[in-house]
Every structure is written in C-alpha cells, then in structure tokens.
Amino acid sequence: MSDLLTHEEYKAVAASLDLPQNAWIDGAYRPAISGKTFETVNPATGAVLGTVAACGAADVDLAVAKAREAFEDGRWSRLHPAARKDVLVRLARLMERHARELAVMESLDSGKTIHDCEQVDIPESIHVIKWHGELIDKIYDQVSPASNDHIAMVVREAVGVVGLVLPWNFPLLMLAWKIGPALAAGCSVVVKPAAETSLTALRLAELAAEAGIPRGVLNVVTGSGSEVGEPLGRHPDVDMVSFTGSTITGRRFLHYSADSNLKEVVLELGGKNPCIVLDDAEDLDAVAAHVVNGAFWNMGQNCSAASRLIVQRGIKDRLIEKIRAHAREWVVGEPLNPEVRVGALVSKAHFGKVSGYLATVAKEQVLMGGKVVAEGFVEPTVVEVASNASILAREEIFGPILTVIPVNSFEEAIAVANDTDYGLAASIFTANGKRALRGAQMLRAGTVTVNSFGEGDITTPFGGYKQSGFGGRDNSIHAHDQYTQLKTIWLDLTDTSDTAID
C-alpha cells in the first residue's frame, strides 16, 4: 500500500468516487425487481452517500437460479484448478490497482478510519484472495489404506450454491474471507452484504467480472436481513450458508435451515474475549499497547476484541496508567483524517446501543473516558467492575469500552476468563512459559494468543467455541473444508475372470 495522503487529499478522492447503486446478479448491475431503494449513509457525518437497490425474495430467487445454472453447467465449478487460480490472482491484482478507491469507499460507508482501511483492511483483503487462489491447485485428495483388492479414493467436491451473509464491521475483509475459499473450491455464491455497508462488495463483484469470474458465479444481493437474508437462508436451492454476525441472528439461520432443506450452516458469531495479564508479565508498556489495540481497534466493533481485561491486582494500577497513556494517542475524529484512530460507529442505531451502556459505565469505577464525543462517536473508555457478573463483562457491547476485572491468582484468572457464553478469542500475558502453555490449553477459545493481541493470520484457522459459532473455520486451508463435500469412491479390483492372468 502506498503512503497515506493528507486529509484534504482523501476528501478529494471521496468526492470523485462513482458509488455503485444496484445489485450484481448474473454478471451485471441490476435494480431491485420491485424498484425499491434504500439510502446508504456516511455514519461520520450523517450525509446520504447514495441509494442502493432494496432487494427482496424475488431478487434472491433470481440470483440463486443464476448461481445454480452457473454451477451445474460447470463454467466455474469444472474449470481446471489452475485456471480458477489465475482468475483469483488477477482479481487480487485488480484490487491492488483500485486499493485506494476501495479504502476510501469503505471508510465513507462504514465510519472506519482511513488509516485502518489503507493499512490493514484492504491490503489484507487482497492477500486473502491471492492466498486462496494460489492454494487451489495445491490441495491433493487422498487414497485410503484399503486392501490389495480395492482402491478407496477420498475426494473433495464443491458443495454447490453458497449463501454468504456478511457483517458490517469488516465489510470487504469478511467478503474476502468467504469468497476466497468458496470460489477456490468451485462453488457459485450469492453474497448478502450488511445493509449498512454494501458498497465495496458491489465494487468487488464488478472487479471480479473484469478478472474473469464467469457470470452467475458471484452475485451480490443488497437489502435488509428480513427481505434478503431470511429468503436466502430459507431458499431450497441453496446448499449451504456461511454467516458472520451476531449470535442472535446466527440462531435464526439454524431455524431457516431446519425449516427448509437442512442446508449446511457455518456460524462465526460474537465474543466477549478475555485478556489475562499476570503479575509476572514483562514490559507492561508493551502489554498496554496490545491491550489498547485489542480493545479500541475499529472502535471496538470486532468480534475478537479484547473487551475484558483480567489483571492480577499487584500490577493493576501500573498497567492502567500505561493503558491511559497509550489510549490518549487514539485520536477520535473524522475517519478520512489519516491521524484519526477512532472513527464513527457504523450507524445511528448502533451508536444508540453502545452509548446506552455508558449509563451503566457511570455507575462503576470509570478509569478513563465514558463520554459521547459527538453524534456517532464514543471515546475510548476503561471501566473497572467489581466482578465478572457485571453486564459490562457479560454482554458483547461492540464498542470502545474496556472492562477491567481484578483477580488474585492465575487459577482465578482462567476461571473468570472461561465464565462466559462465548469462546472466540483470548490472550494471556506472562513471562512464565509453563503458565502460558497451561493457560492456552485451559482457555476455552478458538484462538489464544500469548504475549500479544491478535487473530493469527491467513494460515491459521479462525472460529470459536460455545456460542461464538461452529460448523467450520475461516482462514487457512481448513476454510476450504466448509465449501466442499467429501466423497468416497470405492474401486473393487478383485479378479473375477475364469482365467488367471499370467
């Protein structure tokens, strides 16, 4: 990614953008069949960016039919793996060429800072597409250890037509996480982006067509959850759904599957992730930097956000002082200003939800922040609670609020960390190698980082335990598993002829 521009230069780029308006079905932009539209709004300013097609069940039917047609005639599913690889690699190159456009579009639509869009989201999205593309012709099937009279092949086949339902917190990156392995496997996809953040998904579909993705293979249907998400989840000709979002909505997709064709469902849901800091942790300044990044990155709108700081009492006060110092560097402001680290919450509704927790914050020991900066903006907040029973420690706030829970021992820290309905991510800071490994084994979470905050990278599977989801993993070679079926082909080599072969 090139160097960041100035605030004024980013505003000039924003003014020059040609924002997409219609759904993308069968290789072309199409208005909703009903003709309805909805406004997409810049959450940082409240200004209307434009209108987007408000699709419904009829549009879902059309997109699924075109996806099924493309899958069955093999224009993508039966293409040579190396040919699919070449197309996805071309798509990654086109994304690189349009990276700044995508970054500014993402910032405008979501309230994310241009700093994060330019430095993290867009480069990582490109890397994900390229990585899965390069993997296509390097995955081998298997031959099982059958008897000498048999050969048993275990082969992967694309699952078919896939519904991909995206969250609004990382619009383009989560799209890449899903279409990368789904398209690599040979599936046809119908993407339902969040209504709040549809623009980059539509633009990427256009770039994918330019890269050579055949018509009908990648479709983007825009609209609300009730009008698009539910019909997609219930559709009898959709073979599987991969959903990332809230646990409440994830439950609905299980019902949709049960009420329709028992389609496979992969869920990546919420989290209330613990960050344990033990009293032997080294370099508290570095620890504090990780804690702040984990809690406030993307305004805390991150399913793997380190929202619960579980710290031994002996070092709590020193660590909090260093957290305050680092958090002051996270400037709140207009997202297109490259110096800003905390932008706007994604929508007026979500701002209302997050700011509503501030009344509860005020009743606890506020260590930092606790206020609304402006409509749509909440300042980084650190609050200490008496126990893990507080709603601030139980509920996924999805905002820049860090809850501090003091503990007395390693054992208590692990018990508090696991005392949650979720199990997506966790981190532990300690200089004791045995405690680090023991803690990582004992923590009930899909990803555990030691002496750092993070989610691993494209090579490591990402997903959760308990109510953080199930059914598959994003990222890594394991992500391909959820978009394929395993088939056994059993060959009988027994000689049944009357005459033996010399």
Image: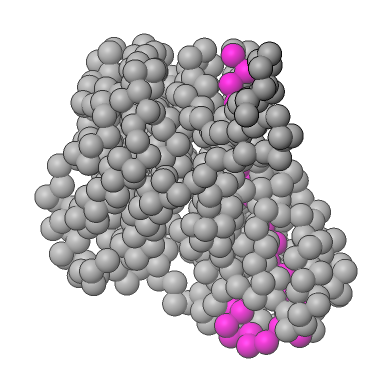
**Viewer can see residue 499:** yes
Where 112 sits versus 250, above or below? below
Residue 266 appears anywhere in the view: no
Q: Is residue 328 above or below residue 49?
A: below
What residue lies at 37% left-to-right and 39% top-to-bottom? 81
**Of residues 255 and 157, the one drawn nearer to the viewer in this rendering:** 157
* Image color mode: one colour
Work out which quarter of the rendered image holds the N terminus and state it: bottom left
The answer to whether residue 278 is above or below residue 51 is below
- Residue 210, image x, y percentages: 19, 39
Examine the image and state in which quarter residue 283 appears: bottom right
387 horizontally vs 134: left or right: right
- The residue range painted magenta reads 261-288
As for residue 276 lying within the magenta part, the answer is yes
In the foreground, 279 or 453: 453
Q: From the image, which quarter does the C terminus lie in?
A: top right
Q: Is residue 40 magenta?
A: no
Residue at 51% x, 74% y is 327
Left-right relation of 99 to 254: left
Could you tell me which residue is drawn at 42 percent across and 45 percent down?
136
Q: Name the side, left or right, on which 448 lies relative to 477.
A: right
Give 223 or 82, whichever is nearer the viewer: 82
Residue positioned 29% across, 12% down in the render:
34
- Percent position of residue 397, x then y: 60, 50
Q: Position of residue 474 (x, y in %)?
A: 54, 46
Number of numbered labels in the structure image: 0
